[in-house]
Amino acid sequence: MQQIRTALDREIPTAPVLTDAGYGNDTGFRDGLTELGLLYVVGIQSSVSVWKPGQAPLPKRKWKGIGRPTKLLRRNGQHNPLAVRELAMSLPASAWKTVRWRQGTRKPLRSRFAALRLRPAHRDYESSEPRPQEWLLIEWPKAEAEPTKYWLSTLPADTPLADLVRLAKQRWIIERDYEELKQELGLGHYEGRGWRGFHHHATLCIAAYGFLVAERSRFSPSARAGQVDLPVAEMPLKFRPRGSPSTRGAA
């Protein structure tokens, strides 16, 4: 789990949490994020159950005045949720839009996506209130026989499809950051046994990586062609390089 590094151009109350399906499948984890006031865009597997757009569990049974008052939501043979894969396969062609989310090393990265507002259905028959509506984002590349990726998100209902896609795909950048931290800056080379030592090690690695990212951002796009446009700081009037003949104490 990791919060995204950059905010969207449009304002969102808080930077959403991004995870893969290993976390996103866990309803308790998603509920915990919501209780903390955190938005999320989490990957899920194709078997996760949801209600069709506009549907919800059946309300509680009418209490007849005998026994305990009824309070739990219901399902029946004609009114059941379905897996996100089944829902995705049933969508019309008009539901799929081609979205470009960033420029790749060779070409723009784009694919087909559909986004729906609906309610997750996991064990809602144990609750007295239906779950709030969320976004279901689905990716189905043209070359594939069926959808390949699914996400649930609690971003606002007016979030454009392009922003949903861009945020969902930010997790690849975060994975790349961790890869560089581990391989280039030694985050994965810690061999100690204590929490404090690991905390110090990780803090220094992250600080070093932050410095490198800041330095990298100073290069203009023309730097790829060998032209680096870096501002040159002015030297103090009395500055003398260490070891120069004019430096006091030099040999």
Image (spheres, helix red, strand yellow):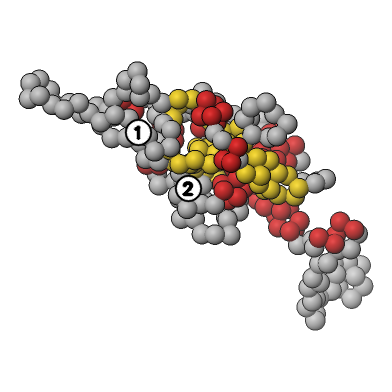
**Please, what secondary structure does the residue beneath circle 2 have?**
loop
Apparent side of residue 216 relative to residue 173 in the rendered image (left or right): right
Residue 65 at what x, y percent from top left? 7, 25
- Quadrant containing the N terminus is top right
Residue 56 marker: 1
Residue placed at 32% from the left, 20% from the top?
A: 76
Compared with residue 190, is residue 16 higher up or lower down, i.e. above or below?
Answer: below
Q: Quadrant of residue 77?
A: top left
Give the residue type that dot 1 points to: Ala
Mark 1: give few (<14), some (14-19) or many (20+) Cα within 10 Å: many
Give the residue type that dot 2 points to: Leu
**Please, what secondary structure does the residue beneath circle 1 have?**
loop
Residue 120 visible? The answer is no
Q: Residue furthest left?
A: 65
Residue placed at 62% from the left, 30% from the top?
A: 147
Residue 59 visible? The answer is yes
Residue 32 at what x, y percent from top left? 40, 37
Give the residue pinned by disc 2: 155
